[in-house]
Image (spheres, rainbow, N blue to C red):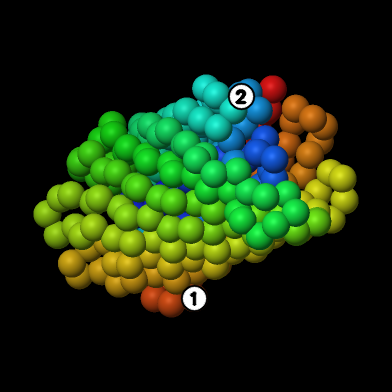
Amino acid sequence: MGGIATAPRLAALLVVACCAIAPLPTLAGAPFVTDDPGTPEHFEINLAVQMTHVPRQTTGFAPSFEVNYAAAGNVQLHFLAPLAFSHVSGDRTRWGGGDAEFGIKYRFLDGEEDGWVPSAAIFPIIFAPTGDEDRGLGTGHTRAFLPLWLGKEFGDWTAFGGGGYGINPGSGNRDYLFLGIGVTRKITDDLRLGAELFRTSKTQDNGKDAVGFNLGGIYDINEMHHILISAGRGLRNASETNEFSTYIAYQLTF
């Protein structure tokens, strides 16, 4: 459910993964920015619309096509191909292919069912410069994000969090740090709701750091079909980084 567009998807659209099969399955990732150490049982496919708005500009993916595949019980292969858009007030909306994502999640620690030790995973992601930088649909540079994710279940509650280092080449760009923490709660057998708080250091020399939150949830139509929704905004420097953001996805698991 994370996963996102510079820095983790403009600090509100970065990593994705859910339906964990660890001994303590954590259910975060999409629709949240902060991920968890969970991996899918077999295949997980997300068809999503996501956007971030700041004054006079809205950017995002409409849609993005994401595939997560369990290559092993604790290894997930990740691919995301977006149709990006960028709209600046007073100008026409630009559409086209955005920067694609490739990643491998490796869960190297399974948490204790009755103890306090969490599950843990690394999830390096490469962002390929497949989008058109001149039209505002890509960055024009190969980027990377190198995170560590933790997760633990406590009855109906799941806590997740972690952070990582973003490699962000290009003139005027800066490498950055991302930190996030969140919780979800099982409301019914079909519905889980949650919230997260995250921070991204500035990604450009003349930029500002970003602190934001998301509220969201996952509704299971049945074992294969799911609806994922989140919405949030910045709490610090929101007018420059994230005045409003949202993520809506249909998810197929099998």
Residue type marked 1: Leu
User: At 30% from the left edge and 44% from the top edge, which residue is drawn?
Assistant: 144
Q: Position of residue 64 (x, y in %)?
A: 49, 35
Residue 66 appears in view: yes
Q: Which mark is residue 43?
A: 2
Q: Is residue 111 above or below residue 243?
A: above
Residue type marked 2: Phe
Q: Position of residue 239 (x, y in %)?
A: 40, 73
For label 2, the crowd category at 10 Å Cα-Cα, with few meaning under 14, some 14 to 19 and many 20 or more, is some
Give the left or right position of residue 115, taking residue 3 as reference.
Answer: right
Give the left or right position of residue 230, taking residue 233 as reference.
Answer: right
> Which sits in the foreground, 74 or 141?
74
For label 1, the crowd category at 10 Å Cα-Cα, with few meaning under 14, some 14 to 19 and many 20 or more, is some
| Distance from the alpha carbon under mark 1 to that under mark 2 | 35 Å
Q: Nearer the viewer, mark 1 or mark 2?
A: 2
In what element is the residue under mark 1?
Answer: strand
Instruction: Quadrant for residue 227, please give it.
Output: top right
Tell how many labels: 2
Quarter holding the N terminus is top right
Mark with earlier residue (1, 2): 2
User: At 61% from the left edge and 56% from the top edge, which residue is drawn?
Assistant: 117
Q: Position of residue 104 (x, y in %)?
A: 43, 33
User: At 50% from the left edge and 40% from the top edge, which residue is drawn?
Assistant: 108
Give the left or right position of residue 49, taking residue 41 as reference.
Answer: left
Residue that mark 1 sits on? 235
Q: Is residue 199 above or below residue 98?
A: below
Quarter holding the C terminus is top right
